[in-house]
Image: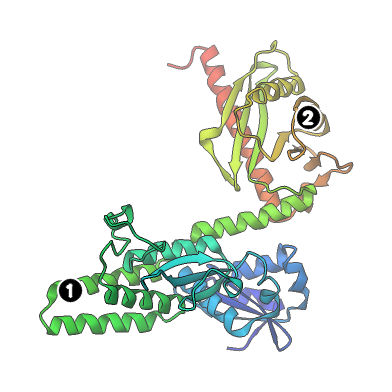
Amino acid sequence: MDKIPVKNLDKLPKTAGVYFFYAKKDLIYIGKAINIKDRVKNHFHQPSYRDNLFIDKVTKIDFIETNSEIEALVLEANLIKKHLPKFNVVWRDDKNYFYVAIDHNQNGIPYVFITHQIHKSKTLHIKSSAIGPFVEGNAIKKVLKFLRKVFPFYTSKNHPKQKCTWCHLDLCPGPNPDIKDYKNNLKKLSLILQGKRKSVLSSLKKEMHNLSKEKNFEEAGKIRDKIFALERVMEHTKVISNEITHAKWLKTQEELREILDFDSKISRIECYDISNIHGKNATGSMIVFEDGNPVKSQYKKFRIKMKNEPNDIAMLKEVLQRRFSHEDWTLPEVILIDGGIAQLNIAINTINKPKNVRVISIAKGKQELFIEGKKNQIPLKELRQDVYNLVKHLDDEAHRFAVTYHKSLRKKSLGLNN
């Protein structure tokens, strides 16, 4: 089909696949997606700093649909290697690219591992081979984890003389493998990672047919099981969906750091809220997000000890003092407070925190975000969508947790628990 002009993004499919950005006739970028339409729109509507290097140059878009995320991942790697688009190659020397390497130990037995910058590696033997580049490290690790169930392989040079844990899980060839069979499996693994799934399936079916003709039904059954397992893996649409979430978090983190003018990596965020009615049954909540996701096992609730007075700022101060008296609790990189400039200042002045912890507050009335060290607040509507969603999710979750505890105390005080 003809390439799609940028103004016609709605014509893109909502399927897994690989997309191509063109600047007039030049292919400048290749990416993969579980949903091509949504992913491409994100490039334009919520650009990262990398997107800003090329997104205004894009005039047309093309795509190839695939049956699954795994096929998209493999196809993306092979197309980047084939076409070397300018804005993929720009990042080749950083650690965003990964390769699946197959090397051999001193006995000539191959093993599989993931590495960066294979073309610069000084550790690989001449016999080694590498497949890639893969953009997402965690994604290719998950793919290998599933493929290992079909084609067991070693992940280190030497295997102990006895069976290892992986052997008992049928993920390792064991201490005394059939070398010919093992190498044949690795060849098939390599072909799959090069996008030659149909060739591998055809080869396996031929092997199964030949074994059946020889009446070796037990071995034929094993090959049949490999075929079914491989087809399930390659057609699975959610094998690497967690990595999509992880990739989204990396983008959101990048945008959040830019807004906060923050150099450190952001992993843990804590959010605080106070709930009370005229100071009675006052409670405070602390909720925790790690890598953009709630960690409910680390939520904390505080029953306010100060006198029953409607003083949210004093209550917040009490909660923060109690929380940060626990030196054994993990420190966050970002602290979000429910409230405006007054709550922000009381938090900054209360917490004896290191420099790599940033305090922000959300004023829901005026819909503004206050940031430690910045004079001007930011209207929430001006935040990039991913950051806006994160801030709102944090605040809503802290409010929900505080209100739930407050209601339970109120019911208890009214004798309504039974």
**Amino acid tagged 1:** Glu
- Residue 281 falls in which quadrant of the image? top right
At horizontal 72% and vertical 64% (from top left) the residue drawn is 47
Task: Report crowding for label 2: few under 14, some 14 to 19, many 20 or more residues within 10 A (C-alpha).
Answer: many
Q: Is residue 162 found left or right of 73 in the rendered image?
A: left
Q: Distance between the Cα atoms at labels 2 and 1?
A: 70 Å
Decide which of 329, 104 is in the foreground and name it: 104
Decide which of 245, 328 is in the foreground and name it: 328
Above/below status of 246 relative to 24: above
Above/below status of 142 relative to 343: below
Counting from the top left corner in percent of width and height, residue 186 is at 37, 74
- Is residue 238 among the parts visible in the rendering? no
Above/below status of 290 relative to 313: below
Q: Earlier in the sequence, mark 2 or mark 1?
A: 1
At horizontal 70% and vertical 20% (from top left) the residue drawn is 318
- Residue 294 falls in which quadrant of the image? top right
Quadrant assignment for the N terminus = bottom right
Residue matched to label 2: 343
At horizontal 37% and vertical 82% (from top left) the residue drawn is 198
Per the image, label 2 sits on a secondary structure element best described as helix
At horizontal 43% and vertical 65% (from top left) the residue drawn is 144
Residue matched to label 1: 219
- Residue 235 falls in which quadrant of the image? bottom left
Counting from the top left corner in percent of width and height, residue 22 is at 69, 82
**Amino acid tagged 2:** Gln
**Residue that protrudes farthest toward the left in the picture:** 215
- Is residue 335 among the parts visible in the rendering? yes
Tag in front: 2 or 1: 1
Counting from the top left corner in percent of width and height, residue 208 is at 21, 80
Task: Report crowding for label 1: few under 14, some 14 to 19, many 20 or more residues within 10 A (C-alpha).
Answer: some
